[in-house]
Amino acid sequence: MALSSIKAQEKEPEPLKGGKLLLGAFALALSNFVVVLDTTIANVSVPHIAGGLAVSPTQATWVITSYAVADAITVPLTGWLSARFGTVRWFIFSLIGFGIFSFLCGISSSLSMLVLFRILQGLSGGPLMPLTQILLLRIFPKNRAAAGLGIWAMTTTAAPILGPILGGWISDNWTWPWIFFINLPVVVTCIVFSIRIVAPFETKRLKQPIDIVGLGLLILWVGAFQIMLDTGRDNDWFASWWITELAIVAGVGLIAFVIWELTDHHPVVDIKVLRHRGFLFPSLAIGLGFGAFFAQVVLTPLWLQQSLGYTAGEAGKVVAWTGVFAVMLSPVAARLATKVDLRVTVSMGIMWLCFVTLLRTRWDPAPDYWTLAIPHLLLGLGMPFFFIGLTQLALSAVPPNEVNSAAGIQSFMRTLSGAIGTALATTAWDTSSNVARSEIVGRMNDAQGTLDKLQGAGLTMEQGRAQLERLVQGQASTLALLHIYYIAAAVFVIAAASVWLVPKPKKPGGMAAGH
C-alpha cells in the first residue's frame, strides 16, 4: 500500500488478530524503541564526537541538548498534528524524517551541521512516542488494550537504559557516526510494516487553523527550560545570569502559554484535558515516579563507571537485568489490569520500586556483581504494574476525542520529568559528593601512616596520595549516591499516594470507548 493511499476509514476498522497483530505491534514498538533510544545513546559518545569534530567536550554536549529540546517541544504537539494530518500519516512522515536526519547526523563534518540535524531529528522523532502509544491501542482488541500498552511501556523504559550501553560499545568498537546509522535499517523495517499493516487505522483529518502564538510560546518556554536544565550544572545554576535569565524566560513563557491555550478556540496543545481528575493525578504520578526512576537510570551507570572503574559494557551487564522480569510480567500486569482496581496494582507497583530503591542504599564502595545486579533484577517486578497501569488509568479517564491530546501531554510529562530528575540528581550527586569528601577528609585518622604503608608496598609518594584520593573519592561518591536513593524512595511514596486521588474506575481496567 502506497503512502498516498493512506486514508481515514469511514468506520472504525476491526482490531488486528494473529500474525498481523504481532507484526503491527512489533513495528510500532520498534519505532518507539529507536526514537527513545536516541535520547540517551549519544550521552557516552560525547568524547568521541568531540575528538572526531575537533571541538571541546563541553561544546559537543549540544548534540544531546539540541535533540532533547526539539523532542520536548514536539511531544505535546502530537494531538494537534495527528488531528490536522492524520495519526498514521503523521506517524509515517515522522519515521521518514527521523531516518533521513539520522543519516545526515552520521555524515556531519562539523558541530554546527550535527547540531542542526539533531534538532531536525528530534522534531521528527518527538511525536513518535505518543503516536505509537495511540496506534497500539487502536490495533489491539479492546479487551487486550492493556497488552498493547505493556509492549509500549517496556520499550519506553528499556530504551533509555540500553542507550548509553549501546552508544559506548559502538563508539569504542566502531566510530561515533554509527550511533546514528544503526537507526536506518530499523526505520526502514518499521515504515514497511506500518504502511502494510497499520495504515487502515488512519483517523479523520480536521482542518484546524494553526495556533501561531501558542506554538511560539511553547517553543519559547520549553526551549528555555530544557536548555536551563542541560547547561545549569556546568554554569553553577543560579549563580549564573545566563541560567537565571533562562529560568525567567521559561517561567513567564509557561504562564503566558497556559493563559493563551486556555482561551484560544483552536489551541496547539489542548491542556484542558487536565480538567479530568482521573487524568491529572495519574499524570502527576507518572511525572514523579518516572523522574525518580530515571534519576537512578542515569546515576547508577555513572557511578559504576566513574567510581568503580566499570566500562560501559560492564555497566550494561549490571543494569540489563532490569528487563528480565519487566518483559516476563508485562502480560500478567496487562491481564490484571482488566480484573482489579488499577489504583491497587499501580500503587503496589510504585511501592515495590520504592522498596528496591531502598535495597540500593545498602551498597558500599566495593560491592560484588550480584549485590549490584539483584536490585536491578527485582526492579523489573514492579515496572509493568507502574507503567502499564498508570498509562491505562490516565487514558481511561478521558473521552475518545481527547485521547491523542492526552497521550501527547502524558508523554511530555514523562519526557520533562526525566530531564528534571536527571538534572536534579546529577547536581545533587556532585554537591553531596563534595560535602561528603570534606567530612571524610576532616575525620581521617593517621593519613600519614596510611601513606607510609602504601610506600612500603612499593608505591611512590605521588602514587600513594593518588591511591588515597581514589579511596576517599569513592567513599564520598557512594555516600552521595545513597543520599539520592533515599530521596528517590520518598518521591516514589508521594507518587503512590497521589494515585489514590484518582476517582475509582467504573469497571476494572476499563478503557474509554474508542481508545
Image: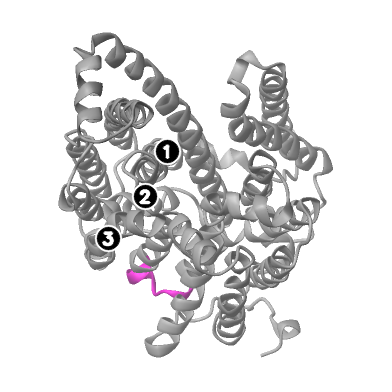
Residue 412, relative to residue 21: is it above or below? above
What amino acid type should be assigned to the residue bearing mark 3?
Ala
Task: Name the amino acid, label 2.
Answer: Leu
Q: Secondary structure at mark 1?
A: helix
Residue 473 x %, y %: 34, 28
The residue carrying mark 2 is 393
**Residue at figure coordinates x 35%, y 32% from the top left:** 463
Kind of residue sitting beneath label 1: Gly
Which is more N-terminal, label 3 or label 2?
A: 3
Q: Which residues are magenta?
A: 139-145
Whether residue 454 sits left or right of residue 419 in the image: it is left
Number of numbered discs on residues = 3
* Majority SS type along the magenta span: helix
The residue nearer to you, when weighing 452 against 219, is 452
Q: Secondary structure at mark 2?
A: helix
Q: Is residue 126 above or below residue 494?
A: below
Percent of width and height locating residue 340: 20, 54
Is residue 326 left or right of 169 when viewed as pictured? left
Rounded to the nearest whole Å, what is the CA distance between mark 3 and mark 1? 18 Å
| Gap in angstroms between the C-alphas marked 2 and 3 | 19 Å
Quickly name the residue at label 1: 291
Q: Which residue is mark 3?
A: 326
